[in-house]
Image (cartoon, helix red, strand yellow):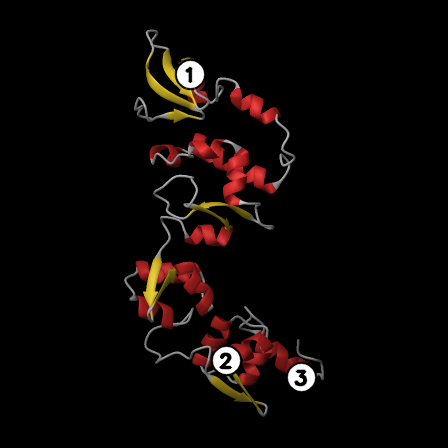
């Protein structure tokens, strides 16, 4: 880690310069206290402040066991020990080193699996650049997230996968093999080349005197939309589709045998 005097921080210590003793740096704490601090202690995290941090921890704010407080602690730990954050110089603003300030700016953490998310991944943790987000939202906001533009809309590949009833690995695999975005998103999962244009989930199909969309039939037969599309595209009869459970290509024969014996088809 490259040290820049006046810029590099270890928890609450700002490194100002080299001490006369090469084993120490001259530092300033966020509270204003200046003193020399051992380099090894700074790098290992065994010292975080001049003592003011420990004093603040003893202050009772009644939220030390809440998700909001835990999220604040996790945010600080990421900046302190995660090499990616350190290398990209992602820091926490001085205001948010105090929990009460963080709480005032962010509010209480929502229920379920939410944590602090940076809106702009090139900037640090500070008011205006952070929000509460669940795991799915954070995944889509990563700098490595693949954004795709199709039909006039731009969203993450994972969002397209959910909308199209496909797996994310199928979409990324097709793009890596050189498929266009249009072909990737309009060709249902499991489709092979040279077999015409596949159906869509909104296609109407009549069966047993009722007409529903392909997606509605899939829900009724307890099938994935992609599986339903593949079976219709492969010219399966609706009777066979209804009788073959998800993931069982041989289920039709068993269903036919149950029909012959007068048993119900699951």
- Crowdedness near tag 2: few (<14), some (14–19) or many (≥20) residues, C-alpha within 10 Å: many
Task: Give the quarter of the image for residue 251.
Answer: bottom right
Q: Name the element at disc 1.
A: helix
Residue drawn at x 57%, y 21% is 55
Task: Give the quarter of the image for residue 157.
Answer: bottom left
- Crowdedness near tag 1: few (<14), some (14–19) or many (≥20) residues, C-alpha within 10 Å: few
Report which residue position mark 2 lands on: 214
Mark 3 to mark 2: distance in Å?
25 Å
Residue 162 lies, in percent from the top left, at: 47, 64
Report which residue position mark 1 lands on: 40
Residue 225 lies, in percent from the top left, at: 50, 72
Whether 246 is drawn above or below 260: the answer is above
Question: Which of disc 2 and disc 1 is earlier in sequence?
Answer: 1
Question: Which of disc 3 and disc 1 is earlier in sequence?
Answer: 1
Q: Nearer the viewer, residue 256 or 242?
A: 242
Residue 115 lies, in percent from the top left, at: 52, 45
* Relative to 236, 171 lies left or right: left
Mark 1 to mark 3: distance in Å?
76 Å
Instruction: Give the foreground label among 1 and 2.
Output: 1
Rendered-image quadrant of the C terminus: bottom right
Question: Which of disc 2 and disc 3 is earlier in sequence?
Answer: 2
Instruction: Give the foreground label among 3 and 2.
Output: 2
Whether 75 is drawn above or below 40: the answer is below
Q: Nearer the viewer, residue 44 or 79?
A: 79
**Disc on res. 228:** none
Report which residue position mark 3 lands on: 259
Mark 1 to mark 2: distance in Å?
64 Å
- Crowdedness near tag 3: few (<14), some (14–19) or many (≥20) residues, C-alpha within 10 Å: few
Q: Name the element at disc 2.
A: helix
Q: Nearer the viewer, residue 265 or 179?
A: 179
Tag 1 near tag 3, CB within 8 Å: no
């Amino acid at each position: 880690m490259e040290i820049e005097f006046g810029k590099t921080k270890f928890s609450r210590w700002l490194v100002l310069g080299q001490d006369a003793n090469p084993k120490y740096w001259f530092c300033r704490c966020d509270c204003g206290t200046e003193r020399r601090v051992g380099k090894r202690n700074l790098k290992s995290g065994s010292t975080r402040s001049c003592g003011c941090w420990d004093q603040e921890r003893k202050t009772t704010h009644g939220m030390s066991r809440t998700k909001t407080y835990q999220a604040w602690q996790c945010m600080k730990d990421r900046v302190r020990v995660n090499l990616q954050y350190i290398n990209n110089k992602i820091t926490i603003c001085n205001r948010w080193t105090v929990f009460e300030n963080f709480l005032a700016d962010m509010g209480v953490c929502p229920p379920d699996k939410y944590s602090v998310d940076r809106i702009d991944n090139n900037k640090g943790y500070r008011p205006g650049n952070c929000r509460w987000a669940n795991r799915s939202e954070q995944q889509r906001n990563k700098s490595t997230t693949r954004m795709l533009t199709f039909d006039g809309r731009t969203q993450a590949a994972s969002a397209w996968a959910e909308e199209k009833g496909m797996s994310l690995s199928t979409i990324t695999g097709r793009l890596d093999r050189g498929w266009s975005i249009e072909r990737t998103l309009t060709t249902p999962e499991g489709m092979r080349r040279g077999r015409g244009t596949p159906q869509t989930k909104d296609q109407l199909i009549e069966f047993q005197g009722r007409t529903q969309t392909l997606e509605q039939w899939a829900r009724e037969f307890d099938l994935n939309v992609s599986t339903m599309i593949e079976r219709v595209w492969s010219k399966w009869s609706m009777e066979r589709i209804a009788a073959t459970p998800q993931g069982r290509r041989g289920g039709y024969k068993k269903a036919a045998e149950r029909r012959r014996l007068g048993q119900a088809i699951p």
